[in-house]
Image (tube, helix red, strand yellow):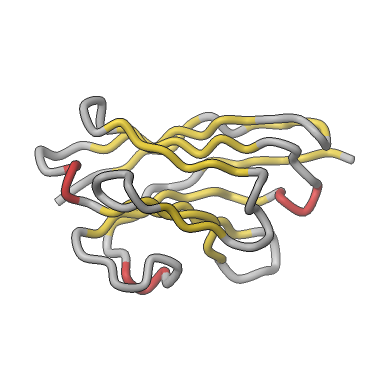
Amino acid sequence: QVQLVESGGGLVQAGGSLRLSCAASGRTFSTYAMGWFRQAPGKEREFVAAISWSGGSTYYADSVKGRFTISRDNAKKLVYLQMNSLKPEDTAVYCCAAETAVLRPRDQGEYDYWGQGTQVTVSS
């Protein structure tokens, strides 16, 4: 089992950058695939990015490709989401998720473990 805690959210102007972190507990973190999802007010939760257990494979939503970068440090049990060129439409609560065997990394139903989320607000 793994517990997840996100941090790094905040208020930023359009065009700015933020780096989100997801800290994990548990001895087997390096065996988990990790994902970032977001939920804006009045909208359903959507996929943002995912990374394989080794970090060798990454996946992005079309809306963030080229602007966001997901990475992980298995020794520190951390997953990062570097967000550049932020837009007002990126405003949402961002959650990280974990699962040991993920066949469809963009599918939130694949993930059993979720953090509480961190708020990202981008002003225009």
Q: Nearer the viewer, residue 123 or 36?
A: 36
Instruction: Residue at 71%, 50% (x, y): give it.
Output: 90
17 to 45, vertically: above or below: above
Instruction: Residue at 32%, 44% (x, y): give it.
Output: 55
Task: Please state the horizontal and vertical placement of residue 21, each as a whole percent of the image.
Answer: 44, 33
Give the farthest residue toward the top. 76
Looking at the image, residue 32 sits to the left or right of residue 14; the answer is left
Q: Nearer the viewer, residue 5 or 104?
A: 104
The image quadrant that residue 50 belongs to is bottom left
Q: Nearer the viewer, residue 87 or 26?
A: 87
Give the farthest residue toward the left. 27
The image quadrant that residue 120 belongs to is top right
Looking at the image, residue 29 sits to the left or right of residue 38; the answer is left
25 to 106, vertically: above or below: above
13 to 97, vertically: above or below: above
Q: Nearer the viewer, residue 25 or 36?
A: 36
Task: Please state the horizontal and vertical placement of residue 26, each as a whole percent of the image.
Answer: 14, 39
Give the farthest residue toward the front. 56
Task: Please state the horizontal and vertical placement of residue 4, each as a whole percent of the image.
Answer: 31, 43
Looking at the image, residue 103 sits to the left or right of residue 11; the answer is left
Instruction: Residue at 49%, 54% (x, y): give it.
Output: 49
The total of numbered circles placed on residues is: 0
Task: Please state the horizontal and vertical placement of residue 10, each as a whole percent of the image.
Answer: 65, 31
Quadrant that contains the C terminus: top right
Instruction: Residue at 47%, 52% (x, y): give it.
Output: 36
